[in-house]
Amino acid sequence: MSGILNYLTFTLTSTNEYSDIPDHFTNCFTRIDMSSQFEPRDPDFKSRVMQSFSEQSVMQTINASLVTVEPGHVEIELPYRRELTQQDGFIHAGISSTIMDSACGYAAFTLMPPEARVLTIEFKINLLAPAAGDHFRAIGKVRKSGRSLFVAEADLYAMSDETEKLVATMAGTLMAVNPQKPE
């Protein structure tokens, strides 16, 4: 029985997808939307995230836009621009890191108290394929929300002609930083 339970995951959606698992095991599982498990500490989190994003010069420089803001979940889009590429015409890994870092950071920021600021304290990136596409979407999701530390993940998709391809992933740790009070 433990083998079957290890096989079941949070993405289990129906018995049709896993026909080899008996119904009595799968009937008790439903798809879990990770972002819905989080309750924001600030009822005005959306406008706070959007305001902070608009103040980020690097996002303006690369022409990125915030397209989705939900508790523990954000999506950022980036159009392809030749000046953001490496020598072979793919979006540079530094740009991929930048957009995924912001996606992780803002996903965590949605869950922070109103007075907090967000700061990345570490991340790891996996470049899975060349970042070639017409535009890109970074999807950031919080996996663990703490009092001051947050763990988030981001996926970067290259999009073109109605297709999307996962080209990079990131795992990061973020910190809620309270502004310093003047002495």
Image (cartoon, rainbow, N blue to C red):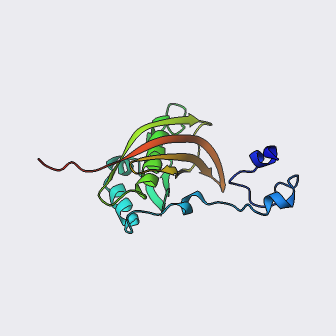
Furthest-left residue in view?
183
Does residue 81 show up? no
Instruction: Determine the image quadrant of residue 114.
Output: bottom left
Viewer-side residue, 82 vs 48 = 48
Q: How many marks?
A: 0
Q: Is residue 20 left or right of residue 77?
A: right
The residue sitting at 61% across, 60% down in the picture is 33
Is the residue 122 above or below the residue 149 in the image? above
- Across and down, in percent, residue 66 comes to 44, 58
Q: Is residue 5 left or right of residue 117?
A: right
The residue sitting at 55% across, 61% down in the picture is 37
Q: Is residue 172 left or right of residue 25?
A: left
Furthest-front residue in view?
1
Furthest-bottom residue in view?
43
The residue sitting at 55% across, 59% down in the picture is 35
- Across and down, in percent, residue 145 comes to 47, 52
The residue sitting at 43% across, 58% down in the picture is 111
Does residue 122 show up? yes
- Across and down, in percent, residue 20 comes to 88, 52
Is the residue 9 above or below the residue 126 in the image? below
Viewer-side residue, 69 vs 23 = 23
- Across and down, in percent, residue 13 comes to 74, 60
